[in-house]
Amino acid sequence: MGPSFTSRTARALAAAVTTGALVALAGCGGGGEAGGGGGTITIGYSGPLSGGAAAYGTNIQDGMQMAVDALNEQGVTVEGGEYTVELAALDDMYQPNTAATNAQRLAEQDDAAVIFVPHSGGIQAAQELNSGRSSFLLGAYSSDPAILATGNPLSMMIPPSFKSYGQPFIEQVKTDGVEKLGLLGTASEYGHSWTGLVTEEWEAQGGEVLTDNSIDYSTVTDFAGPVSQTLSEDPDVIFLGGPSQPTALIIEEARNQGYEGSFLIMDQAKFEEMELFTDPENLNDSVGVMPVKEYEDPGTADLVAAYEELVDGERPATVEVSLHYQSVALVVKAMEVAGTVEDPEAIRGALGDAMGEVDDRFRVSGFPTTITDAGHLQNEDLQIAYRNDDGDYEFIAIENAED
């Protein structure tokens, strides 16, 4: 079993939240017109900085702040004006309506031309504002393909769509004699979407899908019952996933109850985080997303080391950290290319050209090589990770799903 949530971690999270609030205040009235001698570029962020998802939200804030610090060290010049980048962070407690309110405030009071939101409900709420009453480029951090289906012209979807994972995940574990799939996913809207995707694909490949024993990962702490119900049907593979900690504990419970089969782990849970909460051997024979440290992008090793120093080794750098780190650098470079710090449409239009100009230090975990017409950042070398019976990772190249 990995370390528990310590008072030291609590203090770190509280400090991060306080820092975010102070940064938000410092960013008020920022912004500046390109060519006017420079000023402040305010990057907005609305995410969960308190409550059950605070660790997730703080990871993202850390990645964004690290990018801001690195950009300021490097220097930012737009149309001859020198700019300082600041992060304005507001807590939305994972609530869509609060995220929309925060986004409006960040755009109208803090002059943020780019605002990041890391949950599907908040993203879709912000999309109702960003090309109408308020104008801003939305950095959408969710793998839910519904984000792209809205046709929002000022959205930038950051991670791969989870549609990219379903078929290759299953093909990796559905070998000869493997027929029955157990379902222990998280009982959120996002989890139900993933469960539906996996169910459809498993049946398309001729397999049998067993009873859906999805769990509310945010409220249930005793997983023995749902795991026992699932194992009573003798599954060959178990699909599960939500936040990393409860996912790891469900896997541990299944192993303790004698399960020896494979796990198919949705993208919300991360191998490197799950290792903190269970014996890593329990994670063997599982397929999921690549750990950040396994990427070979030029800036990966330095980011992993810098993040470890920042958090004093208490938690690893995940893609929440790394993808926001590189995405902040990308949008600031797009401002330089577009020649504006305040026109979100021009910034959105410059993203493709900006990709080739971002410094290597910001290329850390599958840096995007293209942006689709729908606004999806994609890397042509997308991979997934299979953790084999020896605990070693095998990487499998996959295709990006169509928008």
Image (tube, grey):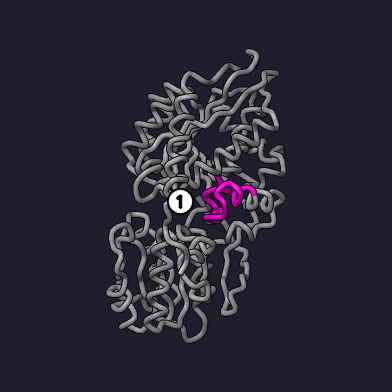
Query: Please, is residue 299 above or below residue 204 in the view?
Result: above
The amino acid pointed to by label 1 is Thr
Q: Quadrant of the N terminus?
A: bottom left
- Residue at the (42%, 52%) spot, across then down: 7
Q: Is residue 310 magenta?
A: yes
Residue pushed farthest top?
A: 36
Question: Residue 363 placed where, x, y %?
Answer: 67, 46
Residue pushed farthest bottom?
A: 177
Q: Is residue 200 magenta?
A: no
Query: Please, is residue 53 above or below residue 273 in the view?
Result: above
- Residue at the (57%, 44%) spot, across then down: 372
Question: Residue 30 placed where, x, y %?
Answer: 52, 20
Query: Please, is residue 68 above or below residue 272 in the view?
Result: above
Q: Is residue 228 visible?
A: yes
262 or 249: which is nearer to us?
249
Task: Give the magenta-colored segment's residue range.
Answer: 306-324
Instruction: Report the number of numbered marks.
Output: 1
- Quadrant housing residue 36: top right
Question: Residue 320 placed where, x, y %?
Answer: 52, 49
At numbered mark 1, what does the secondary structure look like: helix, strand or loop? helix
Question: Residue 162 placed where, x, y %?
Answer: 47, 57
Residue pushed farthest front?
A: 7
- Quadrant housing residue 331: top right
Crowd class of label 1 (few under 14; some 14 to 19; many from 20; radius 10 Å): some
- Residue at the (42%, 72%) spot, across then down: 251
- Residue with the mark numbered 1: 9
Q: In the figure, is residue 398 to the left or right of 237?
A: right
- Residue at the (61%, 36%) spot, across then down: 351
Q: Is residue 148 visible?
A: no
